[in-house]
Image (cartoon, helix red, strand yellow):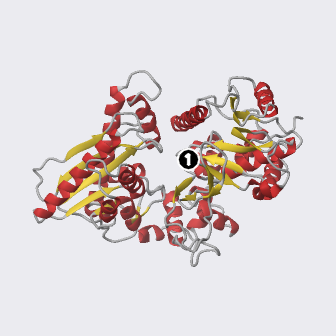
Amino acid sequence: MAPVVLSPRDLAGCEHRVALDFSHDRRPGTEPDPPGVQRRKEAAADHRAAVRELLRAVHSDQPGAFVIVDPGMTSADRVAATLRACDSGASWIWNATLPTDETHGRRGHAELLVRRGDGYIPVIVVNHRVTQPAKTAPDPAGRPPTLVTSPFWTWAPSPDPYRTGRPNRRDNLRLAQLTAMLVEMGRASSADRSELRGGVIGVDADCIVVHDTGAMLDDYQQVLDHRLAIAAGRVETGPRRISECRSCPWWVKCGPELEARHDVSLVATGNQGAVLIDAGITTIDQLAAQRGAPPEGWPGAVRFGDAVIGAIAWLTGTELVRRLDSPRVHRADIEIDVDMESYGEHGAYLWGTLRTDTTDESVPVVYRPFVTWDPLPTRDEARSFAEFWGWLMAERAAAHDAGQTFAAYCYSQQAENRWLLGSADRFAGEPGIPSRAEVEAFIGSPEWVDIYEAVGENFICPHGKGLKRVAPVAGFAWRDEDASGEASMEWYRAAVALGGGRADEGQRTRLLEYNEDDVRATKVLREWISDGAAEQAPHERDLLARQPAE
């Protein structure tokens, strides 16, 4: 029997997935990755390629310093090429593949090995943010910052007072595994565990975040041992619904199993589910029958009654449950629905708006997009954002001047706020760009209304609070059956020809229609909350009256 060997991917996420991966000859189905998964892989590959070319250019005047291992070679040939580069003393080795360590059950590759002393430091390149700007100025008392970074083009770690880290356990475990493998090979930068380091280059590619990998090794070893036991079948696991299930190929097996036994994780995830299972409440039926106080350790920010009602709703097929006799949402004379479309971390290319004058039904409800079709990232994004902001503020001022109330609406303001503030920061000083203070004043005012929050205040949502989950209850339907945030990423790539070739005008139209439907869905939903929900959605007391006896 071949030895069990784990990649860093096997160390994080669902334990049951690891058990299934190693107990079956192949994963279910032969279909390609879902579009969203494929897009993320392509975006990550594009990001790594951009980082590679930046570093190659930086070191182009140093022959032999920056070595690229050909990814098209076999694994064995990549290992051999990596070891030759190490033996030759190359300063930077891109696409390094380490020899599989069957004794300890691990394999790994690093986007970079950076020479330090007689050995190497692993550096990985990821397509997510690993830092954010520090919220406070450098400490006047002289206390050192908690984050250490190195310039992008060299290895020179120093405390960084201008950034804070965004920890990622998957990144940490990957760095720890690479460090342990280098130590075992005798290729690490130091024999002293306290001096072992690793690095991460994030999506901004503006620095290398330095990690103390020596301090990670004990925790890593515990994780590795446990996961090896799972993969070998020595530790039993079972399915449980978590966020990872959305893109897991094993969901075709786990989903029906969970449905068949009414598993409680279908309605209570995360800490809620863990507490319920620890208390012996493992099925939806058991949760629906609960009375009195929540089990010990129940998350304080979540009402236990909501979980019970959610379980009853699941059993009865109820889509939405009212909390209040008369649901309420902030309304105004001039109402503007807003929806933003972004492409990963690269920028916001479209701000869609829908203007409604509630004082005069004869005024047309008009959709107006503010868009750039220059491939992101692009400075033209500043132009489209400035036009959107200027129009929105002009509508607000006109309403005020006419003695009318004004409100702008979005669905889940976290995304819109991020790009409102980010655009103000990135394009500061360009024509029409507001200051950060102006944006903060607006999004902190009562005139910026989050309908996602209004839904949570008014309803219990057993199937989730996403717009595409809730708006259909209010009677809205999207024109495109494939409409989703993930799908829109694929449409965008074609719309601006990110993969090469000619831009697809049809996909541009599709994106505009998708965005228009999102703002119209927000409008329909908020109007339904104030005008129709009281009659059409059952109250929570109605469901509790159906609560099964213990």
Image-quadrant location for residue 264: bottom right
Residue 433 visible in the snapshot: yes
| Camera-nearest residue between 119 and 439 | 119
Q: Is residue 284 left or right of residue 351?
A: right
Q: Residue furthest top?
A: 501
Residue at horizontal 59 percent and vertical 44 percent from the top = 152
For label 1, the residue is 128
Left or right: 462 as drawn, with respect to 60: left
- Amino acid under label 1? His
Can you name the residue that lies furthest to the bottom here?
292
Total labels drawn? 1
Q: Quadrant of the C terminus?
A: bottom right
Q: Is residue 232 left or right of residue 510?
A: right
**In percent of the image, x 65 and y 41: which residue is there?**
250
Q: Position of residue 341 (x, y in %)?
A: 38, 44
- Residue 409 falls in which quadrant of the image? bottom left
Residue under the image location 23 percent in, 43 percent down: 368
Q: In this view of the protein, can residue 478 be seen by the observer?
A: no
Query: Tag 1: Cα neighbours inside 10 Å, few (<14), some, or many (≥20)?
Result: some
Q: Is residue 131 left or right of residue 93?
A: left
Q: Secondary structure at mark 1?
A: loop
Q: Which quadrant does the N terminus fall into? A: top right
Image location (x, y in percent) of residue 200: 64, 47
